[in-house]
Amino acid sequence: MQTEETRIARNTALAVLALVALRLVAAALTPLTFDEAYYWMWSRHLAGGYYDHPPMVALVIRAGTMIGGDTAFGVRVVSILSGLPMSYALYRSAQLLFANPRLAALATVLGNVTLMVAVGTMIVTPDAPLLVASSFVLFFLAKLADSGRGAWWLAVGAAVGAAGLSKYSAMFFGPAILIWLVLIPDLRRWLRSPWTYVGGVVGIAVLSPVLIWNAQHQWVSILKQTVGRARVEGFRPVFVLELIPTQFVFATPLVFILAAMGLWLLARRRAGTARARVLINSMFWTIVVYFAWHALHARVEANWFAPVYPALALAAAVAGWHSEAGARWLRLRDFCLRWAVPLGVAMFVAVTVQANTGILSGYRRDATVRTVGVGWPELARGIEEIRRAQGASCVLASDYGTTSWLAFYLPADVCVVQQGQRIRWVNSPEPAPELLAGKLLYVDAPGATRPPFLEQGFERVTELARLPRKRGPLVIEIYAISLLEGAKGDVLDRSPPPELSRWRLSVRGRGRIALSRKGACWRR
């Protein structure tokens, strides 16, 4: 038996290594998305938090660039390699909950071929470390249930804290764990155990850098992602209709079907123990139900479901090994099992090829064309030639995406700064005053209305060129390049972020808040 389990584990490891290797190749060939370039800029100035998210994604990128340099591969390498410990946690979770090494192997492989994991670990966002942490939350809870040892609560707390360092949606693990403890009678004793609460303290300790940073910055990041997201402004149920199609693609269609079958089996108590069934359902449905409610009034991005994917992979594997069903059920299951992995790999390759070349759509536009930085190396060379010819000391942009791409693709010694939204760069040093006092180059975001500060803040504004960003023969967008001369005052707009303006005005009514010159705090 041991030999059989070893063989299964070895083959699973080889399959995962092959999938990780494929992602590494794709990562080296694919230019950064604007979000990745943005997080790369975070990684240059590490801190306990940032305007949009907690700091884990910046730490992951910093570790990667120490290995691969400031390249697309370097930015992504650690995120991709994190799929290895994630796969280990997923395998062990399934093994502990179902005592079936074949089911564990299937869960691990199916999880890895979903686009959520394949693309989600290659394109570095906060969802990548969140996927890893979510897998370990599930593993440590399974270990707790299997061993009955309270010390495992410390590991659970650390994993939940690490998830919180990745993304604020980790807050849903608290209700999910509570539901599991309440619904399983022999687990309710943990509600009275000090181990449970010591684990909570460990989680808060791990999360403390985020809490400290937010306390120092008027809780701006937490306000943005909680109060800002949860605010209900109208009823627009059309967004609910987007949920299933997007997850059908992100899970890959055949894994999605297997997961739906597995969740049905678990709900009908036709597979696994009560502990396993309730744990998977609570980890899955707690988040899904909330985002279904959220979709009644606002769009829910497909990647927001990342924390449920470890549980989804286990549910898919449950369906794959359940044989007590009718002939139609078994035929559908067998078809999905046969083609889930080839289809998942083919979809990942197709997405990568399309993002880089556009060939699959006949070089027409698609969902990736604006977000992936294809054409930016050539565009940046054109911008740098103009900057040198004009003697501009700094390059300005109005949005964080363009700013981040400019910083990544222009030479490292070039000053690049976003003119507004200074809260996004609160952890970065301000550019030297002399860099903003001379000639400046302004890069217009495509499609954006030219901001009034250009005419109001400078004596002369001269458009020099319009440069295209292209993918093959397709012109993706055109950037207007202008020379700014004779600044009439402070070049940078230091207005407070909208979250603080709304919060302070509505709750305290103390008037306008402005960013200080250093950008590190606000004053009333």
Image: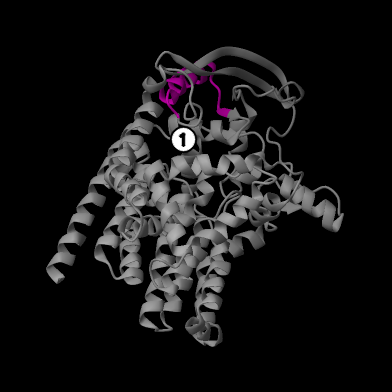
Instruction: Report if residue 65 is visible in the image.
Output: no
Q: Nearer the viewer, residue 487 or 481?
A: 481
Residue 233 x, y percent position in the rendering: 76, 45
Give the SS element for disc 1.
loop
Tell me which residue sits at (27%, 45%) in the image. Answer: 338
Residue type, label 1: Thr
Vertical comparison of 499 with 466: above or below:
below
- Dominant secondary structure (helix, strand or loop) of the stretch shown in magenta: helix
Vertical comparison of 273 with 419: above or below:
below
Q: Nearer the viewer, residue 438 or 164?
A: 164
The magenta region covers: 373-395
* 328 relative position to 505: left or right: left
Tell me which residue sits at (50%, 59%) in the image. Answer: 284
Residue 174 quadrant:
bottom right
**Would you say residue 332 sits in the magenta stretch?**
no
Q: Nearer the viewer, residue 176 or 508?
A: 176
Residue at mark 1: 33
**Would you say residue 374 sits in the magenta stretch?**
yes
Residue 99 x, y percent position in the rendering: 29, 71
